[in-house]
Image: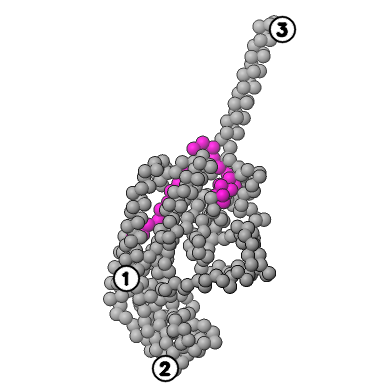
Amino acid sequence: MSNFQLGLLIAGALVLILVIAGNAWNQHRNAPKRPRPDEPAVGGPGDAAALRQEPALNAAPLPEMAGGGTEPGGHIVDPRDTLDLPLPVAERRGGLDALIDAIAPITPERPVSGDAALAALPPTRRAGSKPFAVEGLNEDTQQWETPQSGRSYRHFHSGVQLANRTGALNEIEFSEFVMKTQQFADAIGATADFPDMLHEVARAKELDQFASDHDAQLTFVLRARQAAWSPGYVQQNATRAGFVPGAMPGRMVLPAAASGMPPVLTLDFDAQAAMSDDPEQTALRDVALSLDVAQVERTEQPFARLRDVAQALGEAMDGVLCDGNGTPLPAMAFDPITADLEQLYDQLDARELSAGSVLARRLFS
């Protein structure tokens, strides 16, 4: 073999090595980012019992800690200290309310036991697409409540919600409300006094128009600049930003300060990726950050927190914040949104439907 042939062979081998190395480097650079081994990702099957879950109205109470315990943040809790804490104040407006419900008084001929009232309740709590409820007046507290076993009631009323995100109460739904109420009244030997249907339907349309004009659900997209992310990498960084696992795969939530309230923000990514057999091999190019304005109290400053979270995640994950169409958003784009939201909050307050209140959460649902 001549020196020339030997040189060509060596040159070819070097080119082949460079090509293989380049492909390996590109594959490594473009592979989904994975969670760091020094901080395990959340959301695995073995971690489910130890993680906080998305708040829900029917969530079971947390177990009590005998002899004191430790809060999730690591602070020691002494049960004796709770004696000095102020009791939580119940929200002023809850249950049926004439502001967003059509209400029919129900007057029984004689006191009705809570057990009899419960047995007479209709099997479903909806009239069409609208929530329906029956409440009894607690003689001791003078508060309306869902009938309770072991109590006696002299006054009841039923109600159907005038509007929600499915639209306004219509004549068919009002008629179903009347039918359900009349069946309950007949079962307990009572007389029901119904409001005028046309008047309530007109109120429903006006309330629905107000709700449509003041409903704000903001969603932004955090998109990877270069390398994609694995679900575990997203979960790890979201956890550092204060998010906890949500009720559905591919969802994490930023909890509100008060227990049982809707989350301040939600972070969503591909649910199929979260449930795949090998999620760390799945590539995510973007995640969604969402704020349901009417569901979150103004004092939580949810939009300011969304901006802070988006900035923190963008820096940590090498992502850029975009609108729904994938267009990057400059920082100045958020200032007009902040001003519009402040005006929206004022308008909801003036209508006694403050963001995060029971009535607002019912109406905007």
Looking at the picture, how far across and down is residue 148, in whole percent? 52, 83
* Circle 3 SS class: loop
Point out the image quarter for the N terminus: top right
Where is mark 2, residue-wise?
A: 109
Q: Residue at x 55, y 68 (%)?
A: 59
Q: What amino acid is found at the position of numbered circle 3 in the picture?
A: Met
Residue neighbourhood size for the residue with mark 3, other residues' Cα within 10 Å, grouped as few (<14), some (14–19), many (≥20): few
Q: Residue furthest right?
A: 1
Quote the CA–CA distance across marks 2 and 3: 115 Å
**Do residues under tags 2 and 1 come within 8 Å of each other at their CB atoms?**
no
Quote the CA–CA distance across marks 1 and 3: 94 Å
Quadrant position of residue 205:
bottom left
Q: What amino acid is found at the position of numbered circle 1 in the picture?
A: Ala
Q: Residue at x 44, y 43 (%)?
A: 321
Q: Any mark on residue 1, and which?
A: 3
- The stretch of residues the image draws in magenta is 214-240
Quadrant position of residue 299:
bottom left
Closer-to-camera residue (340/114): 340
Q: Is residue 326 left or right of residue 113?
A: left
Which of marks 1 and 2 precedes in the sequence? Answer: 2
Image depth: mark 1 or mark 3 in front: 1
Looking at the picture, how far across and down is residue 79, in whole percent? 63, 70
Q: Is residue 77 left or right of residue 86?
A: right
Residue neighbourhood size for the residue with mark 1, other residues' Cα within 10 Å, grouped as few (<14), some (14–19), many (≥20): many
Which of marks 3 and 1 precedes in the sequence? Answer: 3
* Circle 1 SS class: helix
234 in magenta: yes
5 in magenta: no
Q: Please say if 351 is above or below 311.
A: below
Q: Any mark on residue 204, and which?
A: 1
Q: Residue at x 38, y 47 (%)?
A: 334
Q: Please say if 108 is above or below 347.
A: below
